[in-house]
């Protein structure tokens, strides 16, 4: 049966737009069921604010199932909050207790400018994918799907990497604001598969270089892995670096084969 | 505009129609394609695949989504899988069998020609997605693995763990991203379609609102594709993502596009029951769980022991008992009603007695925990996060929830609405699933429409327009629509009443769920049709949106969407009222067999209801398109 949490002290970042300097605002949540999700707690807060003729807190969210990657809150200094491998929307109030102070901030990274309150612009991620995060396979010409068997272990490893939801927690958690976990995950997904070999080195170079245009550099803190809701392993960064070095050393981009 | 319904079904035998169509379709020469501008609204499976393919072919494509990135479309949330008639398992599958299963699953309320084409191209989809790098599940030998889904007796469902939609959408998104990178697609994120513009009875373009700064702008094109998803959120609580809404389709409807079968909505049998009044959405547990989970309730309404303490003799495995040949894999509507009846009879389980058990203990004993974890691990984790219970130890509790909408914009064989130049694809159209969709068939349809159908059919429309001027955004029709849209959003801000859009959304949802949900009656629907207009009036007088229309304002976005849900809700109830039969997801309590199964009325209702907007949502005009069953004989749908 559900219990109720009382007297939660919320400290929430409010910022009216990209040029506003922003500030924390305090709110008290008198009572909320521990069955509620974290975002439902914010829904309740927002309905209350509308009731008081105030502006509700803007935050990004959509699926509320941990898969779309839209939700993006820094909760008590942790990207997606205290529960491991859990996106903000899957965090439930049973993880908190009455009287807790909860600090809620947006992702903070220079590549993710704030749009309003807790909402940021993550389109730099799209730029990375656009530069090479795909396999060129025009519609219609594909061979039979079972023509190339893929060992289960390889398919599974590709799948592990491709589970990334593009949320940006890795960037937010990184002291340097680096996007290596995100970029490495996509490169690992595609570079592991037989279908991804033709463009392997071209892809790696293009994506890494686009990443470097927008994001800070990785100095192996490992905070990204700890924050990732999809448990993307930091090994993908090693794979990316290896392929990038190989490509640069032998200028394989042009020949495009291993 | 007078509505004409020509479904444009090509002549010939069912298996030859699509080939014949493609042979006869007019073509646009490669060098001329860039002279055409096509707008695609929506970046789910249907929109992303259509946009990427058309850009590859050479058209200029502008793409719109209200999400912050095309990768976030609701298709991302699909869990279970995608069907295709590959017959890789050698278990007797074929294009004809998939065609037959889909027609039967849809309770003989879909158009044969479209469904056959869907089954035909299903095989190409899997080839295409594998070539793009979708990491589908594989057997140890390296070949693709399959599972079975409700309503089928073969294993034809391809899957990527419990994240099939995510993997497919990322595949399509990556193809789209490639075209964006190449400069062939202009992508507009955080931009919402707020109106459709017609000039001389043709679709001339759209009007959008920039969600970041509120700017209302027109976009002209030769053709527009609506790939804007379904309207399940009219129920307030559903498995859909929070932002899913009907606005795009509804605005097209108000501009003359017929809305077909709005009462065909699907309730999914396996969702986590509601636990709290503040709940904002319901979470689906993939239907694939029914491959290994057994649905049961205690035989005694006062049962208070924990599930594992209830002896076999005091359990009722409802689906296995009622539908021995399909068992726990009976189709969605059938399974949902069985659960509802058990709960209505007081046999529900859980603290609120609002669910039934889905029990994996036999599967764990038979297959071992490892195999169960391999198959469903991430679903079990998700369940535990939400419900706070571990399904390896305690059976899951599930209950039906709104999940999918079969109704949508009426389209012909070419996926064109009755407005020339306006197309609808994916869940936004009504075309392939009749009165009930089979599991794993929505992903298939979205990708079929986008990759393999629209790119052909659009050319047939565009070819004769070569080098002819089209109306630009300075045309008065665009200016008028822009002004109206801006005024509409300002209007919500100006009401300055006392209640939030969410309040009204919950209320509409409650009415629709109570009277136009799993079971409908004439009396209930009439009640809804008297309550909804009254509530709508209150909405128009008492809505409160704080903030302004010139900046990011999520309350304002919501207000516009709830407004359209009201109007759609009224149409749904009318459609349900006038369809005096039970079929698929539309169950009218007055029309059932002695055993409580749906009773169709083929004599009077073997047709599509296509509604015409008149300005008053309670006074829409009902048109019909007769459905002819030539390849498959109309038969009672039985899963016994
Ligand atoms: C939880 C869940 C699980 C599912 N599992 C399965 C499954 O296992 N197998 C299966 O086959 N099906 C499944 N389905 C159904 C399937 O996922 C959907 O029917 C399908 O993905 C819809 O795809 P779509 O491309 O038509 O629309 P969507 O993916 O919903 O995309 C709609 C797009 O339109 C955009 N849009 C909408 N309105 C506007 C507007 N006004 N302005 C601008 N943009 C707009 C959105 O931003 C979005 O990009 C599931 C559905 C749910 C809810
Ligand atoms: S790698 Fe993990 S944290 Fe980073 S974007 Fe992907 S899912 Fe989010
Ligand atoms: S809202 Fe989709 S991942 Fe959190």
Image (spheres, helix red, strand yellow):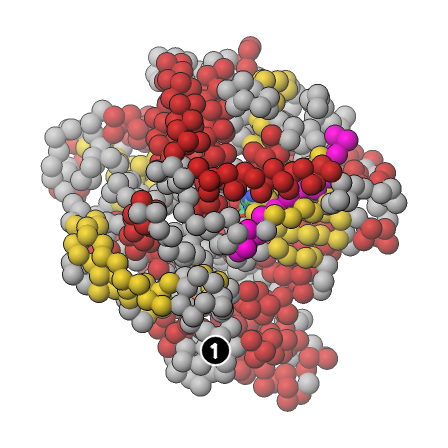
- Please tell me which residue lies in front, A150 or A119: A119
**Is B393 situated left or right of B128 in this image?**
left
Q: Pointer 1 indicates a residue of which chain?
A: A
**Is B410 situated left or right of B343 in this image?**
right
Rendered residue at 13%/33% (across/down): B303
Above-or-below relation of B42 to A201: above
Rendered residue at 73%/45% (across/down): B473
Which residue extends farthest bottom? A249
**Is B585 situated left or right of B318 in this image?**
right
The span shown in magenta is B199-214
Residue A63, x across and y down, in percent: 42, 50
**Quadrant of the snapshot with the N terminus of chain B:** top right
Let me know if residue B203 is in the magenta part. Answer: yes
- Please tell me which residue lies in front, B65 or B470: B470
**Quadrant of the snapshot with the C terminus of chain B:** top left
- The image quadrant that residue A209 belongs to is bottom right
Above-or-below relation of B558 to B608: below
**Residue B592 visible in the picture:** no
Above-or-below relation of A95 to B359: below
Q: Which residue is mark 1?
A: A178
Label 1: which secondary element:
loop
């Amino acid at each position: 049966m559900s219990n109720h949490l009382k007297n939660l002290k919320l400290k929430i970042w409010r910022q009216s737009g990209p040029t506003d300097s922003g500030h924390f605002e305090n709110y008290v949540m008198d009572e909320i069921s521990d069955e509620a999700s974290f975002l439902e707690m914010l829904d309740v807060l927002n309905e209350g604010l509308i009731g008081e003729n105030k502006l509700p807190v803007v935050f990004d969210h959509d699926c509320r199932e941990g898969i779309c990657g839209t939700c993006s809150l820094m909760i008590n200094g942790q990207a997606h909050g205290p529960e491991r491998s859990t996106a903000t929307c899957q965090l439930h109030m049973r993880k908190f207790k009455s009287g807790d102070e909860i600090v809620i901030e947006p992702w903070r990274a220079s590549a993710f400018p704030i749009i309003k309150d807790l909402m940021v612009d993550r389109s730099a991620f799209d730029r990375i994918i656009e530069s090479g995060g795909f396999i060129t396979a025009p519609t219609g010409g594909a061979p039979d799907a079972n023509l190339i068997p893929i060992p289960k272990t390889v398919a599974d490893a590709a799948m592990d990497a491709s589970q990334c939801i593009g949320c940006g927690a890795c960037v937010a958690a990184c002291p340097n604001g680096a996007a290596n976990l995100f970029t490495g995950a996509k490169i690992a997904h595609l570079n592991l598969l037989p279908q991804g070999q033709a463009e392997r080195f071209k892809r790696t170079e293009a994506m890494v270089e686009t990443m470097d245009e927008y994001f800070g550099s990785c100095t192996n803190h490992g905070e990204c892995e700890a924050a990732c809701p999809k448990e993307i392993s930091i090994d993908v960064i090693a794979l990316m670096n290896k392929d990038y070095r190989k490509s640069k050393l032998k200028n394989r981009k042009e020949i495009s084969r291993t | 505009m007078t509505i004409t319904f020509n479904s444009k079904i090509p002549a010939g035998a069912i298996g030859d129609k699509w080939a014949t169509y493609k042979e006869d379709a007019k073509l646009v020469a490669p060098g001329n394609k860039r002279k055409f501008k096509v707008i695609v609204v929506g970046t789910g499976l249907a929109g992303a695949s259509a946009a990427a393919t058309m850009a590859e072919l050479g058209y200029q494509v502008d793409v719109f989504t209200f999400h912050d990135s095309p990768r976030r479309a609701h298709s991302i949330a699909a869990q279970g899988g995608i069907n295709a008639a590959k017959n890789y398992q050698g278990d007797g599958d074929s294009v004809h069998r998939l065609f037959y299963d889909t027609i039967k699953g849809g309770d003989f309320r879909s158009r044969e020609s479209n469904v056959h084409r869907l089954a035909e191209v299903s095989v190409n989809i899997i080839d295409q997605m594998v070539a793009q790098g979708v990491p589908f599940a594989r057997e140890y030998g390296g070949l693709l693995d399959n599972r079975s889904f409700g309503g089928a007796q073969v294993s034809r469902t391809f899957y990527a763990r419990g994240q099939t939609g995510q993997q497919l959408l990322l595949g399509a998104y990556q193809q789209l991203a490639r075209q964006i990178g190449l400069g062939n697609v202009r992508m507009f994120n955080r931009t919402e379609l707020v109106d459709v513009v017609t000039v001389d009875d043709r679709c001339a373009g759209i009007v959008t609102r920039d969600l970041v700064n509120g700017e209302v702008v027109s976009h002209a094109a030769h053709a527009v594709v609506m790939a804007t998803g379904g309207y399940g959120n009219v129920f307030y609580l559903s498995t859909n993502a929070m932002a899913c809404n009907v606005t795009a389709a509804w605005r097209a409807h108000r501009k003359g596009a017929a809305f077909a079968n709005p009462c065909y909505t699907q309730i999914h049998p396996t969702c986590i029951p509601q636990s709290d009044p503040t709940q904002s959405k319901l979470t689906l547990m993939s239907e694939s769980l029914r491959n290994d989970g057994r649905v049961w309730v205690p035989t005694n309404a006062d049962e208070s022991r924990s599930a594992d303490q209830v002896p076999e003799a005091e359990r009722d495995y409802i689906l296995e008992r009622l539908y021995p040949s399909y068992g726990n894999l009976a189709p969605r509507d059938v399974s949902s009603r069985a659960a509802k009846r058990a709960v209505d009879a007081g046999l529900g389980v859980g603290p609120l007695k609002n669910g039934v058990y889905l029990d994996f203990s036999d599967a764990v004993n038979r297959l071992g925990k490892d195999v169960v974890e391999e198959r469903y691990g991430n679903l079990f984790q998700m369940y535990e996060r939400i419900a706070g219970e571990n399904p390896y130890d305690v059976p899951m509790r599930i209950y039906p929830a709104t999940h999918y909408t079969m109704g949508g914009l009426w389209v012909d064989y070419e996926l064109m609405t009755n407005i020339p130049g306006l197309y609808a694809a994916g869940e936004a159209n009504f075309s392939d699933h009749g009165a009930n969709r089979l599991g794993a068939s929505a992903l298939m349809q979205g990708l079929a429409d986008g990759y393999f159908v629209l790119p052909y059919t659009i050319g047939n429309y565009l070819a004769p327009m070569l080098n002819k001027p089209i109306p630009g955004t300075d045309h008065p029709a665009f200016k008028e629509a822009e002004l109206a849209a801006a005024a509409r959003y300002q209007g919500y801000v100006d009401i300055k009443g006392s209640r939030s859009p969410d309040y009204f959304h919950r209320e509409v949802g409650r009415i629709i769920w109570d009277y136009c949900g799993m079971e409908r009656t004439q009396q209930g629907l009439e009640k809804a049709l008297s309550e909804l207009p009254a509530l709508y009036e209150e909405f128009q007088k008492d809505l409160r949106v704080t903030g302004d229309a010139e900046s990011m304002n999520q309350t304002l976005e919501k207000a516009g969407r709830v407004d359209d849900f009201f109007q759609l809700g009224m149409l749904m109830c009318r459609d349900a009222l006038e369809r005096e039969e039970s079929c698929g997801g539309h169950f009218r309590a007055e029309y059932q067999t002695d055993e409580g199964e749906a009773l169709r009325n083929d004599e009077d209702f073997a047709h599509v209801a296509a509604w015409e907007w008149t300005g008053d949502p309670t006074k829409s005009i009902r048109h019909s398109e007769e459905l002819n069953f030539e390849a498959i004989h109309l038969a009672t749908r039985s899963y016994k």
